[in-house]
């Protein structure tokens, strides 16, 4: 009987103590809410929206088109993200993912085209966990977005850093992917999405996201050990909210929460699902891959 190789710890106590120093760090960014990104995302999501004009409200989650990182090319790391250590802590784990979030919008003060807006961000916590395949580090960032009338929305943003995959995976007996969870069946609302590399490219371009896992197939398969290009977590979340908007047009979404459960790859179509409550005030949302495994779950609350 052989003994399974256990994942190696890469974060020692001194490193973790240093990363904790980032808790409380803040950053303030300013941006103008313009119409062009809204037109482009509407086309990318295959919507038939009216052209945005001055005063048009920004749809829920579309504020992710603004306050974008604009690091110089020489400031980028090998994964296409900015080198570790500015506002976010310098986590020495190579795999970085958007793990989830919780958002609330103020119905009396939506962001609108023409607004001069400001986003104030604060690192709330840095937490370590030992997972099946190695170290995990969770960073929680709180965002507040303001316009001239005050607070427009709040967001809690969960980031997870993971250890590099062990190679070869077969020698360890441990998969680098989370254990699969079957998705619920029989949703009232369903939509199939084909995540081809053009869709991923357009969303990366719109969000100025240089992370190579979304467009560099050689990098994502040979360096990070995934089977294909990874569909952006924020894109899937946006598509889940878009499912609500397609079935309840005109409804105001006052809160939304989501959690990434398992990566979605560009190799196969995936499905969006929605199940409204009996009173129509909340909608349970989830995404599943082509094999029926749960990839993201969320919930929207309607005003």
Image: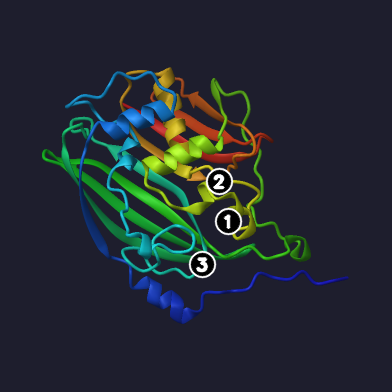
Residue 280 versus residue 2 in the image, above or below = above
Which mark lies nearer to you, 1 or 2? 1
Tag on residue 287?
A: none
Residue at numbered disc 1 = 219
**Whole-number angstrom distance, CA of label 1 to CA of label 2:** 11 Å
Q: Position of residue 89 (x, y in %)?
A: 38, 67
Tell how many labels.
3
Of the 4 image quadrants, the one containing the C terminus is top left
State the residue position of label 3: 93
Tell me if residue 18 comes above or below residue 24 in the rendering: below
Instruction: Give the farthest residue toward the left.
Output: 148
Label 1: element kind:
helix
Instruction: Let me know if residue 46 appears in the view.
Output: yes
Upstream in sequence: badge 2 or badge 3: 3
Q: Nearer the viewer, residue 215 or 42?
A: 215
In front: 107, or 199? 199
Please state if 76 lies on the left or on the right of 188 as rendered.
left
Which quadrant does the N terminus fall into?
Answer: bottom right
Which color scheme did the rendering employ for the protein?
A: rainbow
The residue where tag 2 is placed is 230
| Residue at (67, 65) in percent of width and height | 166
């Amino acid at each position: 009987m052989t003994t399974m190789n256990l994942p190696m710890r890469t974060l020692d106590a001194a490193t973790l103590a240093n990363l904790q120093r980032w808790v409380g760090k803040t950053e303030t960014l300013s941006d103008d809410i313009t119409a062009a990104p809204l037109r482009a995302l509407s086309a990318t999501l295959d919507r038939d929206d009216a052209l945005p004009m001055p005063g048009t409200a920004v749809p829920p989650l579309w504020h992710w088109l603004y306050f974008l990182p604009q690091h110089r090319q020489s400031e980028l790391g090998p994964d296409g993200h900015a080198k570790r250590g500015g506002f976010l802590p310098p986590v020495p784990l190579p795999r970085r993912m958007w793990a989830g979030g919780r958002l609330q919008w103020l119905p009396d003060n939506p962001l609108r085209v023409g607004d001069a807006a400001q986003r104030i961000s604060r690192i709330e916590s840095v937490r370590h966990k030992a997972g099946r395949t190695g170290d995990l580090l969770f960073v929680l960032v709180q965002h507040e977005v303001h316009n001239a009338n005050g607070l427009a929305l709040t967001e809690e943003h969960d980031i997870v850093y993971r250890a590099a995959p062990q190679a070869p995976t077969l020698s360890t007996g441990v998969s680098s992917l989370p254990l699969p969870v079957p998705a619920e069946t029989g949703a009232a609302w369903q939509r199939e999405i084909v995540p081809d590399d053009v869709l991923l490219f357009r969303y990366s371009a719109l969000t100025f996201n240089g992370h190579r896992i979304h467009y560099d197939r050689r990098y994502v398969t040979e360096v990070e050990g995934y089977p294909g290009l990874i569909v952006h977590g924020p894109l899937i979340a946006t598509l889940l909210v878009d499912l609500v908007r397609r079935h309840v047009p005109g409804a105001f979404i006052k809160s939304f929460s989501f959690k990434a459960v398992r990566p979605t790859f560009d190799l196969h179509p995936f499905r969006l699902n929605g199940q409204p409550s009996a009173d129509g005030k909340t909608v349970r949302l989830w995404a599943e891959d082509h094999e029926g495994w749960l990839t993201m779950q969320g919930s929207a609350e309607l005003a």
